[in-house]
Amino acid sequence: MIKEKYFKGDRFSLILVLKGQSIDKKFEIYYNIRSLNLIMILTSYNNLSLFIKRHFKTLWPYLNITKIFNILLALFEMKTKRAKCFSRPFIYRVDPCSLCNLRCVSCVTPWVKTKEKRLLALEDFKKIVQKIKKFALRTSLYDMGEPLLNKDIYKMINYASDNGISTLISTNFNLFNQSQLESLFNSRLTVLEPCLDGFSQENYIKYRQNGQVEIVKQNIKEVMEYKRKNQKNLPVVDVQVVTFDHIKEELPLIANFLKKCKVDHITYRQEILGFNSPQTTIAYKEKINEKPCFWLYLGMMIRPDGSVYPCCGRDFDRFSYGNILNQDLSQIWNNKYYQFSRSLFKKGPDLPYDPEMLKIPCFTCPQFKIHRKMKITS
């Protein structure tokens, strides 16, 4: 958690102290605020206010009257905890590829056996865009894998851009190379999130196994040089750094490198999958959110086969709420699964027993507090 935040002359100093540890274990990261526009510490992956702070500047150019009205209506329906919604989701995560070139320690993607389709076809993506474009503000093209493994990724980004939708990809950036620079910038990608979780190869591969940190650093450098040379505003380059215990000594090196590259943003993320020490994992453990789950009102997750999920839970063969390739958005958004899930977050009597609803992921969600249960049958 952030204990102190202050300015020293023309430098911005962030002092982070892990909860439960002594003050002498703090570490400092210095940035020249003339070169870096934003420093963000993400204390939660499921915090709506943090999402708005991070992305508002890159989303507002894509707003129109229809989208503004839909957003306001969605926020009102979330506030009033409606089960059936007249609004439609406006933040989407569409997974272009659930395969990966790395073997990250806490990730199941390289090892799991699944019946799910692993690559999203370009024509299927176009069908999805046509069904969501009226209200869609942002489409993040990543989830369970590496988006650059999909050979049509830049065509997908370009198609979304043509249809007035902001785009974002998060990538380990090992597969990128100089030959892709023009495709990247011509696609009009809104936000690029390369991950840099270490400075030395020795520490980088402790988590990002099979990765090459020098390739990542070189790619970040070349993207920023191309962006400045060609006077491009997009993509906004927001480098993601997961604050693993084993890279804390390297954080100043990472900071200095990114300052020299003049990246647009940097975001520090807490590791939440248990790779860090038990002490750090406990210190970073999120409190259960008392508010209704915003995913059920504002967002939608879509996998390569078109299956729809209420959120981006990290697993395969999950219980699907529908299929966007075979159904209309309105059919899915207010079907019995979505309405039942929203009802769990509104106080009231027990809900009627339905054995199918036992598969709903909201029952086991550690992030948001549910207020209702199903009646128990005799």
Image (cartoon, rainbow, N blue to C red):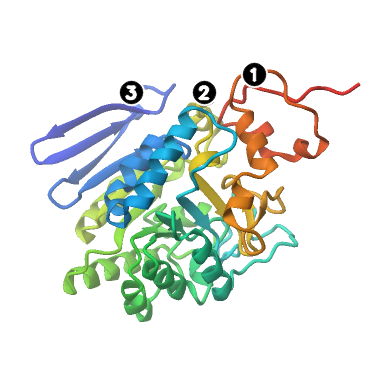
Label located before the other in sequence (3 or 1): 3
Report the residue marked by disc 1: 348
Q: CA distance from mark 3 to mark 1?
A: 45 Å
Residue nearest the observer in this picture, 374 or 50: 374
Determine whether, in the image, residue 34 is placed left or right of residue 296.
left
Q: What numbered label is drawn on residue 290?
A: 2
Q: CA distance from mark 1 to mark 2?
A: 15 Å
Residue 350 at what x, y percent from top left?
Answer: 72, 21
Sooner in the amino-acid sequence: mark 2 or mark 3: 3
Spatial CA distance of label 2 from label 3 is: 31 Å
Query: At 29% from the left edge and 69% from the top edge, which residue is drawn?
Result: 223
Residue 180 in view (yes/no):
yes
Answer with left or right where residue 142 lies relative to residue 337. Answer: left
If the image is split into quadrants, where does the N terminus sit? top left
Give amino acid for label 3. Ile
Q: Judge whether 161 appears above or below 79 on screen.
A: below
Which disc number belongs to residue 23?
3
Instruction: Identify which amino acid the numbered label 1 is placed on.
Output: Gly
The amino acid beneath tag 2 is Glu
In x, y percent, where is residue 105? 59, 51
Look at 58% across and 55% down and name the residue there: 329
Horizontal side of residue 37 vs 333, given as left or right = left
**Pointer 1: residues within 10 angstroms few (<14), some, or many (20+)?**
few
Residue 168, image x and y in percent? 40, 59
- Residue 370 lies in quadrant: top right
Work out which residue is located at the far right of the displayed protein and give it: 378
Q: Residues within 10 Å of mark 2 (few under 14, many from 20)?
A: few
Q: Is residue 375 above or below residue 145?
A: above
